[in-house]
Amino acid sequence: MMELVTLPNGFRIYLEPRPWSKSCAMGLYIGSGSRFETPETLGVSHCIEHMLFKGTDSLSAREIAELSDNTGGTLNAYTTKEYTCLYARVLPIHLQTIFSVIADMALTPALRIQELETEKGVILEERSSYEDSSEDLCSDAFYESFWPDDLLGQNIVGTEETIRAMDADVLRRHLQKFYVPERMVAVFSGKFDRDEVLRLCTEKFGAMQNTGFPLAYSVPRHKSFIRCIRKSFQQNILTLGLPGLPADDPRIHACNYACAILGGSGSSRLFQRIREEMGLVYSVDAYHSAFLGAGVLCITMGLSAKNEDKALREVLKLCRAFPQSITPEELERAKMQALSAVTMSLESAGSSASRIGRNALLMNCVLPEDELLHRLQSVTLDEVRTFTQEFLTPENFSLCVVGKPHTEAHYRAVLEEV
């Protein structure tokens, strides 16, 4: 049974004991992501994530690495558009050691100037790697054009200019503003001593001051567009996209089922038609990405330029006929895929901790596993059809093409003819 304990300063602790587990997954989730930055500090959350591993006031970078390796567990971190996560998985006897390291990394990072300059070079190389990936480049370009006036549309790494401009003072100011108890959630899933965990959290985070800065967001406005990027890739990557649903929308499961039926698996409409029957693409996928206050529904394809027109027309044709043609059998297949994926994922303490941390931080709500499975099972065919009728409107598609594209006018003509 999951338990929430909130310290007087607003720091939240989620406890999910699993008596059958022999390890503990833990995570510290912080409401610091690229959409909460400024154009001048874009990428600061990601830069801080890198610098947390470069040493604290009491530990060197090497000592952090050795402490992690000595326990035989894992210690890592990642940054998203909406939050940063420090996470680990260890045997219970090492929980105190590693959680103390996580706390020190979050609260007292050293941010040494020389190490920051070195790490900025690493981040610039990471950014350059996206330019060499057609899929990453197309995804980044799509988001940037879809939400051009909101940082939700920007890559979390930042721009070359903002990365080079980072200094220790910028990082410290961001830490002081965003690494506060009201924007933090700690999660423990697996085998652990409840009293020890609460004592550790209180010791490490209980003295922090609540600054009255809870996680909040603005709703971004999307823009329709056609964007072509010429690169010397052997295959074109094409992304079609429409406005979707925010993460807390009750229709989110109907949306995900629609994507699964349309292009989310080997038995989906798009995969069977334009790959298996027509042989026009190597890859095709339909998916939905949900954020606070906004979402986007996308169809992506990897194909040669000579097949684009035929594939695009077929995708648009399938989308137009899709809402009323969804069958009960397709919905049941999508439900089984989702129910199986969730059930198998939540067998992992790490996956369960991740679900709890993200939902608790962003939406201040964590559904019990049984309730989540019930909601997945209870979606009706009418709900899926109603969602697709409202949202899957081919005439509103935006388009991004990376590789050897035709002209914008050419794509506009193809999109308008169906």
Image (cartoon, rainbow, N blue to C red):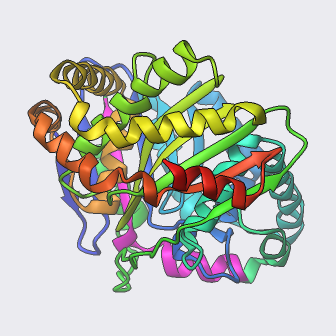
161 in relation to 404, above or below = below
Tell me the magenta residue range. Answer: 170-190
- Name the residue: 58% across, 39% down: 312
Q: Is 101 situated above or below 39?
A: above
Can you give x and y, in whole percent of width and height, for residue 198 in the image? 28, 52
Q: Nearer the viewer, residue 171 or 336?
A: 336
**Position of residue 197 in the picture relative to residue 397 (left or right):** left
Q: Is residue 330 magenta?
A: no
Q: Is residue 160 visible?
A: yes
71 left or right, relative to 113 = left
User: In which quadrant of the rendered view does residue 235 lie?
Assistant: top right
Residue farthest toward the top in the current orientation of the protein = 276
The residue that appears at 25% across and 22% down in the rendered structure is 330
Left or right, 263 with reference to 15: right
Residue 227 location (% of width, % of height): 69, 60
Check the picture and name the quadrant holding the N terminus: top left
Q: Can you say whether 321 is above or below 23 in the image?
A: below
93 or 17: which is nearer to us?
Answer: 17
- Residue at x 31%, y 36% (from the top left corner): 322
- How many numbered marks are there? 0
Q: Is residue 51 visible?
A: no
Q: Position of residue 402 (x, y in %)?
A: 75, 48
Q: Quadrant of residue 62?
A: top right
Residue drawn where x is 85% and y is 58% of the image: 124
Is 188 within the magenta?
yes
**Is 176 drawn above or below residue 253 in the view shown?**
below
Q: Nearer the viewer, residue 47 or 265?
A: 265
Outermost residue toward the front?
417
Q: Nearer the viewer, residue 249 or 311?
A: 311
Residue 398 lies, in percent from the top left, at 54, 58
